[in-house]
Image (cartoon, rainbow, N blue to C red):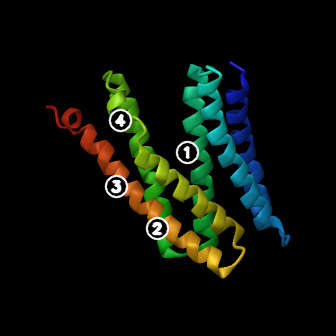
């Protein structure tokens, strides 16, 4: 159970409260440090999946824990960003992204119970959504410059649009099962 990919996933979970504390520290470097911690967590997300496949170290524990760590990490960051900015558009994006994660997680679990999880597997659109989302969150945490904030707003809007589109794709893929009577 304790292989390199699962250790990275567990490390990512450990980083979540560290990230939250650092974000609220009253120092000029706190936003940069929080953005770095979020970036590091994002890198471990990419690395743990890659290593699990490359080293043939996929485990049921890792398959369960990895998406949990991802969703908690992103949800915590989005809630903190929405509270920090107190902006209707950022709050809307956070609500849409978090809601989609809950809906799709429930859909995948339900479809797995029917033996049809493959029909709602992760798509390439979901990977683009995740990349835009992670970069947007890092920029919104760091707040380095006006151009970075503008780019982060654009990336967040892109991630939100991709979130809606990908959710619709998953729901359409499961439509036959959802509409059975």
Give the class, few, some or many, for how many residues have Cα within 10 Å of label 3's Cα (few <14, many ≥20). some
Figure disc tally: 4
Q: Earlier in the sequence, mark 4 or mark 3?
A: 4
Q: Nearer the viewer, residue 138 or 26?
A: 138
- The answer for how far apart the CA atoms under marks 4 and 2 are is 24 Å
Q: Is residue 18 left or right of residue 13?
A: right
Identified at 65% across, 48% down, the residue is 42
**Badge number at residue 71:** 1
Residue that label 2 marks: 157
- The answer for how far apart the CA atoms under marks 1 and 4 are is 17 Å
Identified at 57% across, 77% down, the residue is 150
Q: Earlier in the sequence, mark 4 or mark 2?
A: 4
Q: Answer yes or no: do the residues labelled 4 and 3 have beta carbons within 8 Å?
A: no
- The answer for how far apart the CA atoms under marks 4 and 3 are is 14 Å
Q: Quadrant of residue 10?
A: top right
**Badge number at residue 120:** 4
Identified at 37% across, 50% down, the residue is 166
Q: Earlier in the sequence, mark 2 or mark 1?
A: 1
Q: Answer yes or no: do the residues labelled 1 and 4 have beta carbons within 8 Å?
A: no
Q: Earlier in the sequence, mark 1 or mark 4?
A: 1
- The answer for how far apart the CA atoms under marks 1 and 3 are is 18 Å
Residue that label 3 marks: 165
Q: Nearer the viewer, residue 57 or 170?
A: 57
Q: Earlier in the sequence, mark 1 or mark 3?
A: 1
Q: Residue 130: x, y in percent? A: 52, 51
- The answer for how far apart the CA atoms under marks 2 and 1 are is 19 Å
Q: Residue 122: x, y in percent? A: 43, 38
SS at mark 2 in the image: helix
Residue occupying the far bottom of the picture: 146
């Amino acid at each position: 159970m304790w292989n390199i990919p699962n250790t990275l996933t567990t490390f990512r979970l450990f980083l979540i409260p560290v990230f939250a504390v650092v974000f609220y520290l009253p120092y000029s470097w706190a936003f940069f440090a929080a953005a770095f911690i979020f970036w590091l967590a994002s890198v471990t997300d990419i690395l743990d999946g890659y290593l699990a496949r490359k080293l043939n170290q996929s485990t049921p524990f890792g398959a369960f824990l990895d998406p949990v760590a991802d969703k908690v990490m992103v949800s915590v960051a989005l809630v903190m960003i929405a509270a920090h900015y107190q902006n209707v558009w950022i709050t809307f994006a956070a609500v849409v992204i978090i809601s989609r994660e809950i809906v799709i997680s429930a859909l995948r679990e339900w479809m797995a119970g029917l033996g049809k999880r493959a029909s709602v597997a992760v798509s390439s659109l979901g990977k683009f959504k995740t990349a835009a989302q992670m970069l947007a969150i890092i920029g919104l945490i760091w707040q380095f410059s006006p151009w970075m904030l503008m780019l982060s707003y654009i990336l967040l809007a892109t991630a939100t649009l991709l979130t809606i589109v990908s959710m619709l794709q998953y729901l359409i893929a499961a439509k036959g099962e959802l509409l059975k009577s």
